[in-house]
Image: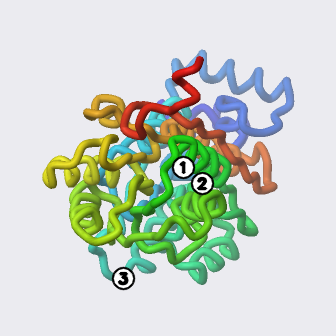
Amino acid sequence: MTIYEVAKRAGVSIATVSRALRGTGPVAARTREKVLQAVEELNFTPSRLGVSLAEGRHAANGIVFPDLAGPYYTEVLLGYEEVASELGRSVVILSTKGRTRVNDLVKDLAGRVDGMLIFGHTVPDPLVAELVRLGVRLVFISRDPLPGADTLRSENAGSAHALARHLTGHGYERFAFLGAPLTSRDDVDERWQGVRAALGGAIDAVDTRHYTVECGFEAAVKLLKGRGRPRAIVCSDDEVALGALLAAEELGLDVPGDVAVTGWDDIMAARHARPALTTVRQPMRELGARAARALDELITGVRDTPSNLILPTELVIRSSCGHHPQEART
């Protein structure tokens, strides 16, 4: 049995059958009864594909990320996929790393899904504006609010400031910030701005090229071997920080005795590193889960006005930043 046969038996359109079964739109009580009676008489089990076709939808969401490697993207994707699955939607993923003709790939994906989750500035602004004009439902993670789309991000500046003040409480005076090029208004740039606001001229930014353990290691080795070695290294994320820990070990330096190291994200490896990594915990899986629900609201018409949400973060103090004098008195 198909949704078309249910519609014929009930004397309604297939779109009405879909709305009645999914509860996604207004259906008169008498009409709903007719649909449910037809479903029972025909022993009909709705298929996801059939309902989607009846509604003019694909039952799929698109995700556009710059990369899929690393624990951050994994956690966000896990949170997103878990909710998308509950909502009966499949997920089509596009990673732009190493790809050419990204604009064409994104446009093609937009034509095959009901809406898209996009990370930061992975998609160029002119294309974003075009997608908004075309009515594509869009949700962004880690991006400032923009017209016509939902945005979700974690709080950065306040926690970065708190982290910097904690380090100055140790008595440290020379600092370095390890992170990829700070060229746009994204999460890492906000972390840098928050730290710099607290430390002023006592901190310099060091380019790591990418947010990876390998790049963090390479940048930290050069930094720690040079003149004016910093007393504390504030890293853009935990992977870069883990690279800095390995660099200190390679050079025979004690952490935190010779140099303190901090990260951001609180991935699983951060708590199991030796020394355990002081970091800022952000709700990565919750970001993905909330993004999936936000996109579903836009697709199903629950709301048509964009939402901009900032999730709280938390400073997590462990041993990689040293023993805090105030803590000794408490």
Q: Residues within 10 Å of mark 2 (few under 14, many from 20)?
A: few
Q: How is the image coloured?
A: rainbow
Q: Are marks 1 and 2 in contact (CB under 8 Å)?
A: yes
Q: Quadrant of residue 104?
A: bottom left
Mark 1 or mark 3: whose residue is earlier in sequence: 1
At label 2, the amino acid type is: Gly
Alpha carbon distance from label 1 to label 2: 5 Å
Q: Are marks 2 and 3 in contact (CB under 8 Å)?
A: no
Badge 2 marks a residue whose secondary structure is loop
Mark 2 or mark 3: whose residue is earlier in sequence: 2
Please tell me which residue is depicted at 81% across the width and 55% down the height of the picture. 305
Q: Quadrant of residue 179?
A: bottom left
Alpha carbon distance from label 1 to label 3: 30 Å
Q: Quadrant of residue 217?
A: bottom left
Residue linked to disc 2: 56
Judged by depth in the image, the label closer to the viewer, 2 or 3, is 3
At label 1, the amino acid type is: Leu
Badge 3 marks a residue whose secondary structure is loop
Badge 1 marks a residue whose secondary structure is helix
* Left or right: 215 as drawn, with respect to 47: left
* Left or right: 97 as drawn, with respect to 297: left
Residue linked to disc 3: 101
At label 3, the amino acid type is: Arg
